[in-house]
Amino acid sequence: MATTAFALDEEQQRFCAQVREQAVERLLPLAHGADPVLGERVNRPLLEEMGRLGLLARLFPGEGRSAAALDLCLLRESLAQVNTEAETALALQGLGFYPVVQSGTEAQLKRWLPEIASGRAVAAFALSEPGAGSDAAALALEAASDGVGGWRLRGEKCWISNAPEADLYTVFARTGPDAGARGVTAFLVPADRPGLTGEPLDMISPHPIGRLRFDDVPVGPEDLLGEVGGGFRVAMRTLDLFRPSVGAFAVGMAQAALDAAVEHAGAREAFGGPLRELQSVGHRLAEMATRTEAARLLVYAAAAAYDANGGTGQAGLHGPTGRAAMAKLFATEAAQYVVDSAVQLHGARALQRGHLLERLYREVRAPRIYEGASEVQLSIIARELFR
């Protein structure tokens, strides 16, 4: 798929429309919605339906196709406009398994890729820890040598999406004494390994989030993802691909909120006429539309920069890292503004449990934190200015 800096081509527009149609007809009926109990569980029927539709398979290279950031962004934006639960389930499947795709062995891929792409197995990305959230290089989970060529994982992971219900985890642990990014190694850890336990956390989220505990969990050379000591690079390559698509998720939420606000402002009568005729309302809608479109263009530019060279190459603001940081920063902050503005224009009705905007208002906050908080993105952008 090719795109200009300004618009999608006809094929891309048809693809987005098809995804939205499938989301309405096939995915929305399976969503848990606002149910706080069901929302704490992985929605496996929803994942399996996405597998049947071929949406999960599009996350990974195959049939001569490389992992495309723009394809991922279009998927996430389109799904988010209809149902954030489906969007998030798809994204987490990709985030959890892409490290295996980029750095795993043939045996690992043969065992797990068909299960992940079909939605029969659930993946999770286990990077964050109680003392290592935004500072991902401060990992403390220990991978101690077992003396016979393997390791024992000891420690804890926290705020892990899909935990403790996932079937496999991409786990980042410290295999050496080096500080910072050096000495971190990535492992593929099936959920049934002895010593691996977990518990759910009560979070504002459309998907389960939990804590994992590792009590001498055994891993061997066959569980390695990439090289010993190369785990931080595995994590950053994955995040470089997925960060622009977090922006796409935000754009989808912003567009849904904007559409709802425009419809409401045109239909609601107030002060002797439609709400949209009030200058303050019209100007607020114009600002919402402008920020949404600006975010969309930054996301597409970041995706195009990644796809141009597979996520490597040019440094600086116009390279994939700089553009990804700008796209995630601006799109998530813009979405927060747009959703909040839409709630304000709707008034009390938007605060009713189950209303589209009530749900968006809860869910739009988290993307400004995960996969690098806004402050982290600012630091990345500042760094790239001088490269």
Image (cartoon, rainbow, N blue to C red):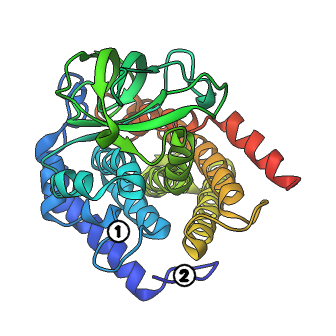
Determine the residue located farthest toward the right in the rendered image: 386
Looking at the rendered structure, the kind of residue marked 2 is Thr
* Residue name at image x 33 percent, y 21 percent: 210
Q: In terms of sequence position, does the residue under pointer 2 or pointer 1 come before the other?
A: 2
Q: Is residue 105 above or below residue 62?
A: above
* Residue name at image x 63 percent, y 34 percent: 182
Measured from the top left, where is residue 338 in percent x and y?
57, 46
* Residue name at image x 42 percent, y 87 percent: 10
Measured from the top left, where is residue 84 in percent x and y?
34, 46
Neighbours of disc 1 within 10 Å: few (<14), some (14-19), many (20+) = some
What numbered label is drawn on residue 61? 1
Q: Which residue is mark 2?
A: 3
Residue 379 is left or right of residue 299, and the answer is right
Residue 310 is left or right of residue 111, and the answer is right
Q: CA distance from mark 2 to mark 1?
A: 20 Å
User: In the image, which is nearer the foreground, mark 2 or mark 1?
Assistant: 1
Is disc 2 placed on a helix, strand or loop?
loop
Q: Is residue 87 visible?
A: yes
* Residue name at image x 38 percent, y 28 percent: 160
Of 203 and 290, the residue lying toward us:
203
Neighbours of disc 2 within 10 Å: few (<14), some (14-19), many (20+) = some
